[in-house]
Image: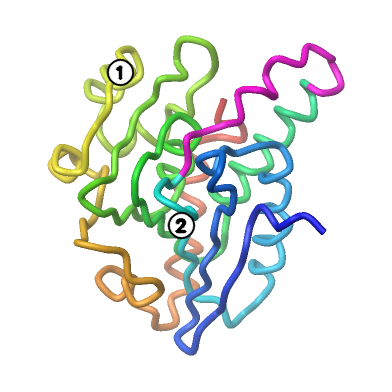
């Protein structure tokens, strides 16, 4: 059997589950198959009342290099519909997940990988983390969350230039990273930022406000 493209561990005794993007040979490129596996896994986790937080990490030395560009080369209308339908389900699944979601970034988070990090509630990174939106030359960018986090001027500059943002600069840019760590400690790393006490009412209200602001479609 092929190895799963997404893995879940936990939740631990404190309610933290860890989702691993498990395609290290392809820099955790977000293929249709990987996105569909993630959607299935987080759908199960969303129904688990013992889950209080979700941490997303990438296997190997990269968070995610973005969508799998090879899949964009297939012009078949059915394939293109599946590609974008899976993209929408993936983004909405992360955005609407019922408890706090933390992106734990080690290495590159580019294009769709940057989008994934932006859709999380918090971003924690190592010093070697880098962010970029190089895809603006050939595809849509998930712009609204980036604008919300860093403001219009910085968001437009990052999207239009596609330049890389390193961990040091990202920590200074308002809202991009919440913490940088010498190395990722999963799941213990989440202790720096999240109160795991019962907070369903507060999280639910924040979710509603954020989702109303981003609308039904992020593309």
Instruction: Determine the CA span between mark 2 and mark 1.
Output: 27 Å
143 relative to 87 in the view: left or right: left
Q: Which of the 4 quarters of the picture holds residue 217?
A: top right
Question: SS class of the residue under badge 2?
Answer: strand
The answer to which quarter of the image holds residue 165 is top left
Label drawn at residue 57: 2
* Circle on res. 91: none
Looking at the picture, does residue 128 appear above or below residue 184?
above
Q: Residue at x 22, y 57 (%)?
A: 179
Position of the N terminus by quadrant: bottom right
Q: Are marks 2 and 1 in contact (CB under 8 Å)?
A: no
Please provide the residue range marked out in magenta: 64-79
Please tell me whether mark 1 sits on a helix, a strand or a loop. Answer: helix
Whole-percent x and y of residue 94?
56, 51
Sequence-wise, which precedes: disc 2 or disc 1?
Answer: 2
Query: How would you rate the neighbour count of disc 2 (Cα within 10 Å): few for under 14, some for 14-19, many for 20 or more?
Result: many
The vertical placement of 14 against 84, above or below, is below
Q: Is residue 189 shown left or right of residue 210? A: left
Q: Which quarter of the rendered picture does the C terminus lie within? A: top right
Decide which of 93, 123 is in the foreground and name it: 123
Q: Identify the residue shown where x is 21% and y is 37%.
A: 166
Q: Looking at the rendered structure, which numbered label has been put on residue 156?
A: 1
Q: Position of residue 93 (x, y in %)?
A: 62, 50
| Residue 104 image point, x, y percent | 38, 57
């Amino acid at each position: 059997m092929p190895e799963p493209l997404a893995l879940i561990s936990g939740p631990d005794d404190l309610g933290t589950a860890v989702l691993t993007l498990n395609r290290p040979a392809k820099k955790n490129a977000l293929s249709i198959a990987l996105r569909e596996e993630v959607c299935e896994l987080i759908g199960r986790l969303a129904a688990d009342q013992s889950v209080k937080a979700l941490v997303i990490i990438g296997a190997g030395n990269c968070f995610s290099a973005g969508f799998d560009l090879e899949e964009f080369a297939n012009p078949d209308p059915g394939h293109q519909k599946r590609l974008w339908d899976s993209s929408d389900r993936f983004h909405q699944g992360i955005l609407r997940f019922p408890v706090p979601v933390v992106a734990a970034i080690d290495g590159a988070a580019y294009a769709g990988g940057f989008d994934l990090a932006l859709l999380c509630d918090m971003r924690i990174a190592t010093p070697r983390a880098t962010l970029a939106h190089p895809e603006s030359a050939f595809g849509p960018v998930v712009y609204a969350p980036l604008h919300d986090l860093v403001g219009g001027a910085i968001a437009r500059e990052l999207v239009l230039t596609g330049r890389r943002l390193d961990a040091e600069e990202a920590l200074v840019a308002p809202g991009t990273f919440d913490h940088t760590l010498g190395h990722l400690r999963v799941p213990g790393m989440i202790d720096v930022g999240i109160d795991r006490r019962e907070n369903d009412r507060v999280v639910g209200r924040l979710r509603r406000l954020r989702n109303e602001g981003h609308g039904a479609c992020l593309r």
